[in-house]
Image (cartoon, rainbow, N blue to C red):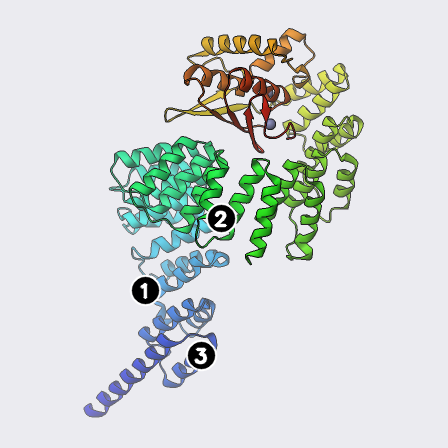
């Protein structure tokens, strides 16, 4: 009796080992189904070791559903009371974009079945919550992290910070971060990355400085986030410093890091450096190509962007929809109407990419900028998808610029019906009435805006000086150098008027006197920033500024004169593109 029981045990052990070996070497789903049959024949469907391995293999083959179908079958309750098994399933689902909710649900049933989570459970669950982007769900998981006593574990807390950042809970993320018992490079990276992704770039840079003071060595993931913050701020000096730092500290230059450097140089105004880095880069990815194409587009170098696109095709790399946004906007910024149309057609015909609303937007922009307002309208009417308000606004702006005021008026009125709380619709209609000299109607619009409590988005300009970012807001009187800056603007005005500058007061379009209009113009934030730079930097230093809105016609003209009279190169990045002012001319050839 004793002997035969032991024999069965040995046989089971052998069968178990055999199954484990088969699972270990299994590489296809077809083989997995065959092994599954084998498991059933051998009666090993309740063996925890075999089941765990089976689940892992399913997960490796991207077929976690197959395993969970068996594990969660109504007759298969008993073997699930195992933390490791649960972790394997949760991890597999957490890694698949479409299945993150399932990952969280499986975690819930784990807790419901009284299976104790361990410190390896939470990073996966929190990662899944981050992917779902549901803050309340994340908060409830945070609750159970505390309940089960893992709120001191750095690895768990790192993913918690990441989760809160992804769900938009920045205060919570920062609170978790600040209260951590100790930080490793992943903790810093999670918080800095969170700030950078949400466009809170100044906070990202500040935290990076704290990280250095703390003496933690950043890894390449942190550096990618810091570079993306530099790109957003247009902070070239900081970006260059980061590049040196990467070299000095011998930080691994992954392809993502190289792409981030290229993107930073392109967006901070040194597109030639971006091109040089790109040309020497091994293993270029679609992101590398797209970054330089977008960069060239922003600098108005449309022909170069187009030729790079051709090189890209020749190299065998297939463009994606983001590449086309860059390419089409390159055509738009350089007035390449025929080329733009050709590329737009090739999207579906050659590359089988269905154009999205952004691509239609680029085309409307292209036609509008070229003054082909009627064609743009025809294009919009033929669109297979509903045009969004941005497209209508592009069209109205073109109507305004090219004197199609009646058309502009009727489009804007419809826009206001659709979006009664969107202030820029009112601003546009008000501007159109200004151009029509219909002051009474214009006043009514402004009163309506006042009633609804809407205001124009204030223009603001950033400038980087001595490792600090300064921000100027239109009409802001609080700056410590307010008096000096305004004296400087007056002096600049006098000098450039002598050289032929005439303030273009139609940009203000307020029904006020000439002098007041000029005064409103001189308060535009880019003028404040340029005056500040002239005061604070040595003769001949190039000036780089970043403006949140599109630069207005008067500031554009003003800057051209300043670049000549003060002999300064001035690089302005506005919402859409770069303007390089030198010797009284701008790289955009007054087309923007
Ligand atoms: Zn302006
Ligand atoms: Zn320009």
583 horizontally vs 483: left or right: right
263 horizontally vs 346: left or right: left
**Which one is in front, 287 or 80?**
287
**Dot 1 alpha-carbon crowd within 10 angstroms: few under 14, some 14 to 19, many 20 or more:** some
Rendering quarter of residue 366: top right
Front tag of 3 and 1: 3
Answer whether labels 1 and 2 touch (C-beta < 8 Å): no
Q: Alpha-carbon distance for marks 1 and 2?
A: 40 Å
Answer whether labels 3 and 1 touch (C-beta < 8 Å): no
Instruction: Identify the secondary structure beneath mark 3.
Output: helix
Residue 84 got which mark? Answer: 1
Front tag of 3 and 2: 2
Disc 3 under 8 Å from ligand 2? The reply is no
Instruction: Identify the secondary structure beneath mark 1.
Output: helix
Residue at numbered disc 2: 288
Q: Is residue 527 above or below residue 359?
A: above
**Which one is in front, 376 or 45?**
376
- Residue 135 at x, y percent in the picture: 45, 44
The answer to whether residue 326 of the structure is visible from this angle is no
Residue at numbered disc 3: 31
Residue 446 got which mark? Answer: none
Q: Residue at x 61, y 20 (%)?
A: 557
């Amino acid at each position: 009796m004793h002997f035969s029981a032991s024999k069965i045990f040995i046989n089971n052990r052998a069968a178990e080992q055999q199954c484990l070996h088969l699972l270990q070497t299994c590489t296809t789903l077809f083989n997995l189904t065959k092994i599954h049959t084998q498991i059933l024949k051998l009666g090993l469907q309740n063996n925890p070791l075999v089941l765990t391995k089976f689940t892992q293999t399913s997960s490796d083959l991207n077929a976690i559903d197959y395993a969970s179908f068996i594990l969660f079958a109504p007759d298969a309750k008993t073997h699930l009371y195992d933390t490791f098994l649960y972790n394997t399933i949760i991890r597999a689902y957490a890694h698949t974009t479409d299945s993150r909710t399932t990952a969280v649900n499986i975690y819930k049933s784990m807790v419901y079945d009284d299976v104790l989570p361990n410190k390896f459970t939470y990073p996966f669950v929190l990662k899944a919550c981050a992917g779902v982007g549901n803050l309340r769900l994340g908060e409830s998981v945070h609750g159970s992290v505390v309940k089960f006593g893992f709120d001191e574990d750095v690895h768990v807390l790192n993913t918690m910070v990441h989760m809160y950042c992804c769900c938009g809970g920045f205060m919570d993320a920062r609170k978790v971060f600040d209260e951590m018992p100790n930080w490793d490079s992943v903790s810093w990276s999670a918080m800095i990355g969170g700030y950078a992704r949400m466009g809170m770039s100044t906070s990202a840079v500040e935290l990076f400085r704290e990280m250095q003071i703390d003496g933690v060595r950043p890894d390449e993931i942190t550096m990618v986030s810091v570079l993306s913050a530099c790109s957003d701020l247009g902070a070239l000096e900081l970006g260059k410093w980061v590049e040196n730092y990467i070299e000095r500290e011998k930080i691994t230059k992954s392809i993502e890091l190289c792409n981030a450097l290229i993107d930073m140089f392109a967006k901070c105004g040194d597109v030639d450096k971006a091109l040089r880095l790109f040309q020497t880069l091994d293993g270029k990815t679609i992101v590398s190509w797209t970054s330089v194409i977008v960069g060239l587009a922003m600098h108005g170098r449309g022909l170069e962007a187009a030729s790079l696109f051709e090189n890209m095709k020749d190299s065998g790399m297939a463009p994606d929809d983001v590449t086309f946004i860059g390419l089409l906007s390159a055509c738009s910024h350089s007035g390449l109407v025929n080329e733009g149309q050709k590329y737009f057609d090739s999207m579906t015909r050659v590359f089988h990419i269905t154009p999205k609303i952004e691509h239609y937007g680029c085309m409307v922009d292209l036609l509008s900028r070229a003054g082909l307002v009627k064609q743009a309208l025809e294009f919009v009417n033929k669109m297979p998808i509903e045009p969004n308000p941005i497209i209508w606004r592009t069209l109205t702006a073109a109507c305004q610029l090219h004197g199609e005021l009646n058309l502009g008026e009727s489009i804007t009125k419809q826009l206001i019906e659709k979006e009664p709380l969107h202030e820029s619709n009112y601003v546009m209609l008000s501007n159109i009435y200004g151009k029509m000299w219909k002051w009474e109607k214009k006043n009514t619009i402004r009163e309506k805006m006042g009633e609804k409590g809407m205001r124009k988005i204030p223009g603001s300009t950033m400038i980087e000086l001595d490792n600090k970012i300064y921000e100027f807001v239109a009409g802001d009187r609080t700056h410590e150098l307010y008096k000096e800056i305004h004296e400087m603007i007056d002096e600049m005005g006098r000098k450039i008027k002598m050289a032929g500058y005439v303030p273009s007061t139609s940009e203000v379009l307020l029904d006020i006197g000439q002098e007041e209009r000029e005064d409103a113009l001189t308060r535009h934030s880019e003028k404040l920033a340029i005056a500040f730079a002239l005061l604070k930097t040595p003769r001949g230093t190039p000036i780089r500024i970043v403006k949140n809105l599109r630069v207005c016609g008067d500031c554009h003209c003003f800057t051209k004169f300043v670049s000549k009279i003060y002999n300064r190169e001035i690089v302005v990045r506005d919402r859409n593109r770069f303007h390089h002012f030198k010797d009284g001319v701008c790289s955009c050839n007054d087309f923007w």
